[in-house]
Image (tube, grey):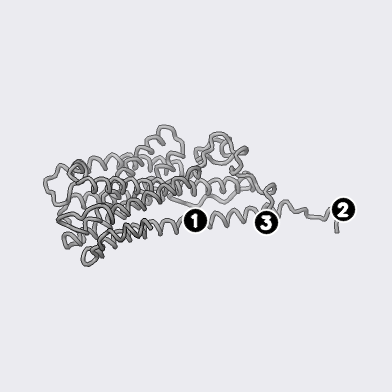
Amino acid sequence: MESPSRRPAGFSDRKQRPPGAVLYGKGLRTLSIATVVAITTALTLVFFYAPLEAEQGFLQKIFYVHVPLAIIALCGFVLGGLLAIQHLRTRDPRWDMRSYVVIHMSLIFAVGTLITGSIWAKGSWGHWWVWSEPTLVSFLIIFLLYATYQPLRFAIEDPERQSRYASVFAITAGAFVPLNFIAVRLSTAYLHPRVLGSTSNLPGPMALTFLVSLLALSLLFATLCKYELTAKHTRAQLRALRRRLAGETTGMPARPRSAAPSLHHAAAPARAAGGPAL
Amino acid sequence: MIVATVLGETPALPLHTAGKYVAGAYIVLFALVLIYVAIMAIRLSRIERDLGELLSDLDKESTPKYPVKGHK
């Protein structure tokens, strides 16, 4: 076992952490516990508290997972755009990293939305997919749009340019999301059930269950984002440590081409010397 | 005790026709989270391995090349 005094100093020691360095792992445990409690509560409410819906019966239980997933995914895409605005304003790579992680997570939630929606459609309408339904198709368009985000990043080798172009993409696509949502709501074909704006029509227990499910999945989203940010931060710290130990002049191997944002291209020399602050 | 009471009071879940769809939807969510956590675990193990390599490199550098006088 290595004695602590012989270990290379990272930022684990509070006194050695340079000012401005953010620890993303802080509060992760509390957030994780809150997520587990919220998800357990939501599942209990869904299966043992919320009444069965008159028309769809037990099948309507999918509503409590499908709709929150869709709402969080869409909000995440918009949030990714807002974080990208902040990145372009400040040129701070940390905002680019946050935008990247939020969009990445929203994409995963969007996959969940599409799959659960298809399952619900099959049970309710008898088809896995209905092309004439504007809500489904518009969500698919948004998903496909964001599916190009990572390939776009990967296609650009220069990290500085990559982050700038990715931010422009995130802002443009983020503005498209609410426009698309409004356009769909203005359309007249209302085969797909309306949720937002009509939650007051839900009976009390159903509305409560829906809100708890929304909260639980929002917490899950936040936890996973924080988890990924912490992992990326640790990886960046490790890379910086390796660079410091090898000496900047010895010519470390170049960073492999990646779609993930780089934290070093805009980092100040002082920060680079002390490690990256995500 | 409370769980048993709740389950005792609750009617059996209607799993005949819609049950497979509902179960499928919730399993999808669970599977997505599980896959994500598994990928993150793989990345974490990679970080751990890199850190171990760094520590061993550091150990090699700090080990004196020639034995110190007085030591065998």
Instruction: Name the chain under label 3.
Output: A
> Is label 1 in contact with label 3 (beta carbons under 8 Å)?
no
Residue B43 numbered tag: 1
Kindly tell me whether residue A248 is visible in this rendering: yes
**Disc 1 versus disc 3: nearer the observer:** 3
The residue wearing badge 3 is A1
**Which quadrant of the figure has residue A128?**
bottom left
Q: Give x and y (percent) for residue B64.
A: 77, 53
Q: Quadrant of residue A125?
A: bottom left
The amino acid on which the numbered mark 1 sits, given as a three-letter code, is Arg
Q: Are marks 1 and 2 in contact (CB under 8 Å)?
A: no
Q: Give the distance between the C-alpha atoms of the residues marked 1 and 3, in whole angstroms.
A: 23 Å
Tag on residue A137?
none
Cα separation, mark 1 vs mark 2, equals 45 Å
Residue denoted by label 2: B69
Label 1 sits on a secondary structure element that is helix
Outermost residue toward the right?
Answer: B70
Say whether residue A156 is visible.
Answer: no
